[in-house]
Every structure is written in structure tokens, then in C-alpha cells.
Image (spheres, rainbow, N blue to C red):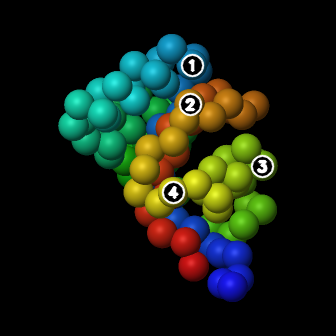
Amino acid sequence: MASPAKTACARHILVKTQDEAQSIKQRLAKGGDFGQLAKRFSTCPSAKKGGDLGEFKRGTMVKAFDDVVFNKAVLVVHGPIKTQFGFHLIQTIFRT
């Protein structure tokens, strides 16, 4: 059995409300560009980089975020995921 991933690369869009996150997710489902939507709507400083968080270790992010990045399907947009920061749409790019 493969050992659990220790690092991952992900991008996200962080917004204040669940409704806003759902609206953006619908745009993505219709072919919207993740990076452009992140630049336009995300309240996270990573918005400047299209929501790209780069590579990080398991346990670096808050638990709800980590759970998605390290346990859910790669290259799929998950969410809205609620944390103390707001509501995230999360896409894991890869895990190692």
C-alpha cells in the first residue's frame, strides 16, 4: 500500500459567504478560468497568483483545508469548504 502523501500543491478561491462560493463554483462548472476567478474574487493574498498556494506539507493548513487537499480527488474543484477564514473552493494540483 502506498504511504500517505506528505506534500501537496493546491490553489484556492477564498470568499466570505457560502453563496458567493457556490456562485463561483457554478462559473467554474461552465468553463470559467480558475486563476482568473481567483484574481477577481478571492480575498486571500494568493489571489494575485491565481489562488496558487504552491507546495506545502501536510499539517501546514487548517484541518478542514488539509483534509480536502490530502484526501480528495486531484484536479477537481472541491467546496465550498468552511474554515475560520471563510469559504474555500479548493483544487489540489498534485500530491507527493
Quick one: label 3 or label 2, which is nearer the N terminus?
A: 3
Which dot marks residue 18? 1
Q: Residue furthest left?
A: 31
Residue flagged by tag 2: what amino acid is it? Pro
Disc 3, disc 4: CB below 8 Å? no
Q: Is residue 82 left or right of residue 94?
A: right
Figure check: 34 above or below 26: below
* Helix, strand or loop at mark 3: helix
Neighbours of disc 3 within 10 Å: few (<14), some (14-19), many (20+): few
Which dot marks residue 80? 2
Neighbours of disc 1 within 10 Å: few (<14), some (14-19), many (20+): some
Residue 39 seen in this snapshot: no
* Helix, strand or loop at mark 4: loop
Residue 86 seen in this snapshot: yes
- Give the spatial CA distance, label 3 vs label 4: 17 Å
Neighbours of disc 2 within 10 Å: few (<14), some (14-19), many (20+): many
For disc 3, the marked residue is 63
Q: Nearer the viewer, mark 4 or mark 1?
A: 4
Q: Nearer the viewer, mark 3 or mark 4?
A: 4
Q: Nearer the viewer, residue 72 or 90?
A: 72
Disc 3, disc 1: CB below 8 Å? no
x and y percentages locating residue 63 in the rendered image:
78, 49
- In the figure, residue 38 lies in which quadrant? top left
x and y percentages locating residue 15 in the rendered image:
53, 26
Quick one: label 2 or label 4, which is nearer the N terminus?
A: 4
The residue drawn where x is 69% and y is 85% is 1
